[in-house]
Image: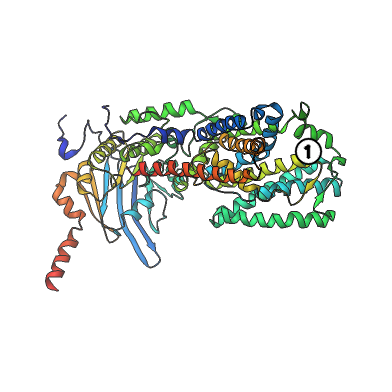
Amino acid sequence: MSRLQIPALSKARPWVQTAVLRPELGSLVAAVLLLMFFSIASSGAMLEIPTLARVLDTAWPYGIIAVAVGLLMISGEFDLSTGVMVGTAGALLGVMATEWGMNLWLALLLSLLICLALGLWNGILVVWTGLPSFVITLGTFFGLRGANVALSKYFTGDALIENIDDAAGYDSLHSIVATVFGTAPSDFRVSLLWWGGFTLIATWILWRTKIGNWIFATGGDREAARAVGVPVNGTKIGLFMLTAGAAWFVGVSNAVRYTSVQAGQGVGAEFFYIIAAVVGGCAMSGGRGSAIGPAIGALIWGIAFVGIPHAGWNSDWRWAFYGVLLLLATLINHIVGERVRTARSG
Amino acid sequence: MTTDQTTQGTEEAPSEPVDMPVLEVRGLGKRFGSVQALQDVDVSLRAGEVTCVVGDNGAGKSVFIKMLCGLIRPSEGEILLDGLATEFSSPRRARALGIVAVYQDLALAPMMSLWRNFFMGGEPVKGWWIFQRFDVAYAKEAMQRELEKLGVDLGDPDRAAHTLSGGERQGLAIARAMYYGARVLILDEPTSALGVRQSGAVLRLIRRAAQRGTAVVLVTPKPQHAFWVGDRFLVFQRGRLVEDRRSETLTLESLSYLMAGGGEVDELESAIATA
């Protein structure tokens, strides 16, 4: 059969192509540049082991949830309830262990089931109502924000749940989610391995499984995906459960690590996960992104959080820095997205 | 080759249409509330033929193809696949039976690579249980093989779909439908957004799909395109199938006349004259 000459697009835009296929590259470059910048600004203190340990310890809770939020964002949805879900998971574990005398491992399982059920609730509501996930999960956010504190006070008389280390099973659970390698201040938590492992698995799922293809397809063009038989709704619901599960992991890890839970914790953190995902190259409109990108986005937060005071600046500048970073990342994503759209009509 | 290329539109030896129709509809009709959108349609589609569906807006042609691909359920009549009455409860079910529609938007996700798009919703996997994974090497190779069968070269399988031209996007979508074993390929205005050169390439592609034994149903508002590629023409008017003509019985002029409304034009002229 003779070759068919189909006229191709004349204008090749290699950088757009790279940005689409390797969305995390920008954040990787930014992370390296920032690390170099703060090393110089802090006269090398930034690269010392204790400082790096602090960077990673700051970054991991954001990283784990940001990876899940990133996958959800690629599928075209948001979750604003992830921050308070951390508090929910911790409070559930705390109340079950300290007030009801439950074994921590059982409390761990039950709190996971409840968090997954909340994620399922988010997902089903989004799919059924067709309302923006922004609104649905904002509702869940406020619901949980109230319930976390109210229920903690109801069961324990206080918003602070303490003495989790008295519960049965504490030592074995601690060794799995909160063990320390090295000695302070050069200490690294086992949480970092969880973060790394979760990022790798998420990357694998995204790039090398059919579920990954469904996630991209769902966010890339929902109707197209549905037309060719992608289970669009199931994919979304599963991802809402994933973000809830990631928040659960961080919540129970912190509860075990600090042996106490502040039921009001996590409020406001949801924005950091979203920012980390966007800085990591996930498109807010869906269809593009990676799992490693949000992890790098969280790392950038860690670098800035530790680096700014090391450079001798007022630590309040952290917030301004992150605001600027979000704006820049969104702008770059937007430009790439526009280029893709204009190329489409050509 | 003895066939006249300009009138017949075939570029290689055409395969003989098989007598047994692949898909047949009898007394097909659709009613939306009190509106009869389509009634009494009898058509049989044969393998290797390009059947063009033409008609005005609201003539019923889109309702017709939507019933063929399972998007709309008929109110009356029946659809027979290989002579057996069949119900298409969903596009998914129709696809499974080999009736594939390529819509105007082509069902491509712009940011995804070609091979990811090609296998969207039908990903080949290997491995077991949680180790089950998307067989990427096979996906790329199978896509290239299918494209080669149609004689289409889209270059690097890793490029994102948004870098394809309109014609290339059609090529990918048609190749994808062929890969899934389309016996009936339904194309909804595939050349509507394309320039002349792109349209030409896509029309040749449609002929090639037919030559491989597919029954192609093509909806197009452009007489030139329909005439070049079509073996058969179904003209719809006000919810009825008013003409069912083979290409030998038509010229481009008579087809254009039919597509512009045919008898309706005469009626309109006399109405204006008497007003």
The chosen color scheme is: rainbow
Q: Which residue is mark 1?
A: A257
User: Quadrant of the image for the N terminus of chain B?
Assistant: top left
* Location of residue A6 (image quadrant): top left
Q: Is residue A78 left or right of residue A258?
A: left
Q: Residue at x 32, y 60 (%)?
A: B39
| Rendered location of residue A274, percent (x, y) | 58, 45
Q: Which residue is most to the left?
A: B273
The amino acid type of the residue labelled 1 equals Arg
Q: Give SS at disc 1.
A: helix
Q: Is residue B13 visible?
A: yes
| Rendered location of residue B178, percent (x, y) | 37, 36
Of residues A248 and B85, the one drawn nearer to the viewer in this rendering: A248
Q: Is residue B199 left or right of residue A210?
A: left
* Location of residue B36 (image quadrant): bottom left
| Rendered location of residue A238, percent (x, y) | 60, 44
Above or below, comparing residue B39 to residue A337 in the picture: below
Q: Is residue B159 left or right of residue A209?
A: left
| Rendered location of residue A179, percent (x, y) | 77, 31
Chain on which label 1 sits: A
* Location of residue A2 (image quadrant): top left
User: Quadrant of the image for the C terminus of chain B?
Assistant: bottom left
Q: Residues within 10 Å of mark 1 (few under 14, many from 20)?
A: some
Q: Is residue B129 visible?
A: no
How many numbered discs?
1
